[in-house]
Image: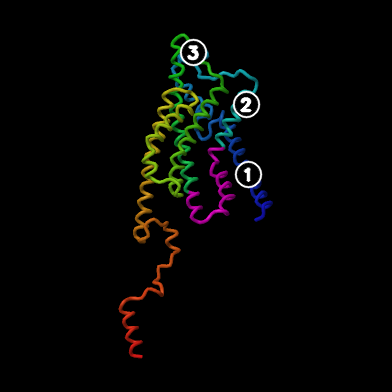
Amino acid sequence: MTLVDHLYELRYRLGLATLAIVAGGILGFWWFSHSPFGLPTLSTFVTGPYCSLPAEMRFSPEDGQCQLMQTKPFEVFMIRLKVGLSLGAVLLSPVWLYQVWAFITPGLYTKERKFAGTFVALASVLFTVGAALAYFVVPEGLAFMVGFGGDAFFTALTGGEYINFVLLMLIIFGVSFELPLILVMLNRAGLVSFDQLRSWWRGIVFVLFIFAALATPGQDPISMIVLAAALSVLFGIAMLLCRSHDRSKARKLEQQGLQGLDPDEASDIDHRPSSLDVTPSAASSSTEHEDAT
């Protein structure tokens, strides 16, 4: 394909991915105030962490309902649109990820396609797990932050500020869970070894705690500790996978008798005996034949 053809292909794939996200956004916009198949509304799901706070710590109208506050015209419309598009990007992620995959695949080798497909699948699972963990951590972080005022204050969050906080927590936890997977892929590519990770593990764990302290938007210790502990556990699992891969690779090299060479390079070497390799018996028989002549 020429450069122009690649640009047309990119435009086509981006168009399909955008249509998928928009379609999911329309579904999320409708779901925000409706209950499909008996499921709770999306607004109930999003406001769940805030409504889990004790009633005396948050603002409640006279009827006792749990509600957020709107301070600008059309603020609710923009919130519904933002939440709907976020939900659409998550629900229809297989569609737009496939479009990205279909654009990249023709330029990859067979082995690279296999690793890339595994990476995309695991990345989706890890992001979902991280976002789910953030959803359960948000109420604890909110309770800690609003508890400093005691009985002298109550919390009346605006819809925009609260939704931005929750979405940011979901994104940070989801993206952070991809870091150990990147280490495993770097090890598979031969850029990082298990021995290197073992010698760096103290510094890496320290960096993970610093990252968690800076990344959590609420700056509360609960979110920071949960994120840092989860990343440390995932880093330990990544180290075990790297050790298993390095040992398997070393066994393959040992079986081939080519220590220090890559198995792919070893397969390209001709192991047949050279014409210059002559056994002693063959050499003696050749000498006797010449003498007889």
Q: Do the residues labelled 3 and 2 touch (CB within 8 Å)?
A: no
Above or below — where is 186 with respect to 268? above
Identify which amino acid the numbered label 2 is placed on.
Phe
Task: Give the crowd class for mark 1: few <14, some 14-19, many >=20 residues within 10 Å.
Answer: some
Give the numbered dot on residue 154.
3
Left or right? Give the position of 219 relative to 96.
left
Residue range highlighted in magenta: 89-117
Location of mark 1 (residue): 14
Residue that extends furthest to the bottom in the rendered view of this protein: 293
> Could you say where residue 110 lies in the image, as x and y percent from the top left?
50, 56
Examine the structure image and report whether residue 110 is included in the region drawn in magenta.
yes
Location of mark 2 (residue): 77
Image quadrant of residue 221?
top left
Task: Give the crowd class for mark 2: few <14, some 14-19, many >=20 residues within 10 Å.
Answer: few
Above or below — where is 69 with respect to 262? above
Identify which amino acid the numbered label 3 is placed on.
Phe
> Could you say where residue 291 lies in the image, as x and y percent from the top left?
33, 88
